[in-house]
Amino acid sequence: MSSEHETLSITAVRVYPFDTRETGGRTVAYAEIEIAGALLLRGIRILESEKQGLFVGFPSQRARRERFVDLVVPLNRDVQKQIREAVVEEYKRMTGWEPSPKKDRGE
């Protein structure tokens, strides 16, 4: 079942806004996706970076000391991109998110 461009059947995306920016965090929401109506993937974080805009963090767990281990790992770029786009687009639709204007740094 290996092909060059595999796709995922994402049947639902749910986003739960959870803005941590006021306390110095970058998480703006959590999300979950339903795959083929048969598998629910929870714990996806939507984060905002000043330079990169919105991006997706997959579920992870603290292993030893401060090291984190990913619990979900997309095995190819197409699947990773498909999940990211579905989650980010739903977040934008729900919240009306627009990129922040670039700050003038006196340059």
Image (cartoon, rainbow, N blue to C red):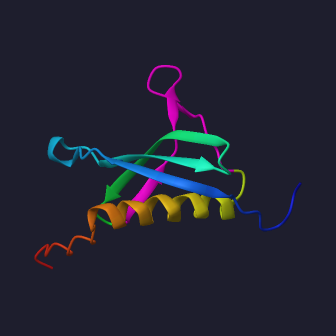
Q: Residue drawn at (52%, 34%), measured in percent from left and top? A: 60
Q: Is residue 71 above or below residue 11?
A: above
Q: Residue drawn at (20%, 75%), measured in percent from left and top? A: 101
In the image, is residue 82 part of the stretch drawn in magenta?
no
- Per the rendered image, the range of residues in magenta is 52-74
Quadrant position of the N terminus in the picture: bottom right
Rendered location of residue 55, percent (x, y): 43, 58
In the image, is residue 61 part of the stretch drawn in magenta?
yes
Rendered location of residue 92, percent (x, y): 35, 66
Quadrant position of the C terminus in the picture: bottom left
Rendered location of residue 46, percent (x, y): 39, 51
Q: Residue drawn at (10%, 76%), measured in percent from left and top? A: 106
Q: Residue furthest bottom?
A: 107
In depth, the one of 96 and 21 nearer the eye is 96
Q: Residue furthest front?
A: 37
58 with respect to 24 (left or right): right
In depth, the one of 57 and 9 nearer the eye is 9
